[in-house]
Image (cartoon, rainbow, N blue to C red):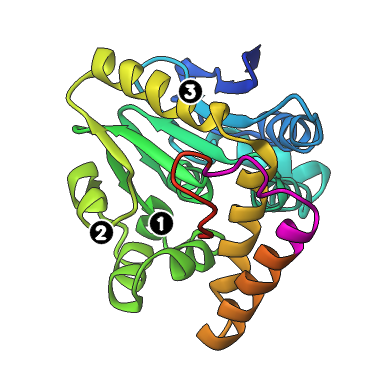
């Protein structure tokens, strides 16, 4: 149901329910939440990759299983679901969604909840839960942080299929691939480049970026200055930029 692979600092998590279009029942939701929390604590993990088995990323919540899931605990599904996004947000390792086919409803939320998205050009995204009169309640705050209010509200509200090319133009997809083979090549290069970076520098950059999103610019610049000063005092700049001098970013 959830395949986990470790290689060269990369932890790949593959949703493996192809017969249900990799839709989330309570069991898979808990498995992914547990795995993200566990793997992100592993110092050997430099990058988290999430993908779907077959030619679909995920169709979101498994509506066929939803009734049985809710019989046990009406809050259990959403408690586990939000754990996934807390884990992605708090993880020191960056996350990459690799999307083929459909990434809709919860699948759209999961892709947008990752730090980076790589996708086939023909992939389709969208908050399809709105088609059933159900607000995209977790996707909406994620979109609100990623894109301007007019587009974000449209993507969250209309429930339409959104082509990958439109999300790429809106800055919500990092790389587009023409087919599955090209996507695999892009994944190897992109994820490999991330894994090759200094993990401490990656974490500090990611933490600074996240903090700066909600700060006034003056405060964010002061935070950057203080980080540079702290790193210099700790000797972290020794050897850095040796070919171009000791300039600071």
Q: Residues within 10 Å of mark 3 (few under 14, many from 20)?
A: some
> Is residue 49 in view?
no
Q: Quadrant of the N terminus?
A: top right
Residue 236 in sight in this render: yes
- Look at the picture and state if 16 lies above or below 69: above
- Asked if labels 3 and 1 touch by Cβ distance under 8 angstroms, the answer is no
Q: Secondary structure at mark 2?
A: loop
Q: Is residue 98 above or below residue 231?
A: above
Task: Examine the image and state in which quarter residue 49 appears.
Answer: top right
Of badges 1 and 3, the one in the foreground is 3
Mark closest to the chain's N terminus, 1 or 3: 1
- Give yes or no for contact between labels 2 and 1 (Cβ–Cβ under 8 Å): no
Q: Position of residue 228 (x, y in %)?
A: 65, 64
Question: Where does the magenta region start and end?
Answer: 230-241
Residue 131 vs residue 1, the one in the foreground: 1
Rounded to the nearest angstrom, the CA distance separating label 2 from label 1 is: 26 Å
> What label does residue 132 carry, if any?
1
Say which residue label 3 marks: 192
Rendering coords of residue 186 (x, y %): 32, 24
In the image, what residue occupies the spot 63% across and 33% down?
Answer: 25
The disc at residue 170 is 2
Q: Could you say whether the residue bearing mark 1 is in a helix, strand or loop? A: helix
The reply to whether the magenta stretch includes residue 102 is no
Residue in the image at 25% along x and 55% along y: 160
Q: Could you tell me which residue is drawn at 56 percent across and 60 percent down?
A: 138
Horizontal and vertical percent for residue 197? 56, 33
Residue 166 in picture, x, y percent from top left: 19, 52
Closer-to-camera residue (238/216) = 238
Which of label 2 and label 1 is nearer to you?
2
- The kind of secondary structure the magenta stretch mainly shows is loop
In the image: residue 165, left or right of residue 28: left
């Amino acid at each position: 149901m959830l395949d986990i692979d470790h290689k060269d600092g990369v932890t790949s998590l593959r949703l493996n329910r192809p017969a249900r279009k990799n839709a989330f029942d309570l069991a898979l939701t808990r498995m992914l939440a547990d795995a993200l929390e566990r793997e992100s604590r592993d110092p050997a993990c430099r990058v988290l990759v999430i993908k779907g088995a077959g030619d679909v990323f995920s169709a979101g919540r498994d509506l066929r299983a939803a009734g049985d899931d809710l019989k046990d605990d009406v809050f259990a599904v959403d408690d586990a679901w939000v754990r996934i996004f807390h884990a992605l947000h708090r993880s020191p390792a960056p996350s990459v969604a690799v999307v083929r086919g459909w990434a809709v409803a919860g699948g759209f939320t999961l892709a947008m909840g990752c730090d980076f998205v790589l996708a086939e050009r023909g992939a389709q995204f969208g908050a399809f839960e709105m088609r059933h009169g159900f607000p995209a309640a977790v996707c909406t705050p994620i979109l609100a942080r990623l894109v301007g209010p007019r587009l974000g509200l449209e993507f969250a509200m209309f429930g339409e299929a959104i082509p990958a090319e439109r999300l790429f133009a809106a800055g919500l997809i990092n790389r587009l691939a023409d087919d599955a083979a090209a996507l695999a090549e892009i994944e190897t290069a992109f994820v490999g480049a991330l894994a090759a970076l200094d993990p401490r520098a990656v974490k500090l950059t990611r933490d600074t970026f996240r903090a700066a999103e909600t700060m006034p610019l003056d405060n964010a610049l002061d935070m950057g200055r203080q980080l540079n000063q702290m790193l210099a005092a700790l000797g972290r700049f020794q050897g850095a930029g040796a070919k171009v001098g000791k300039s600071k970013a």
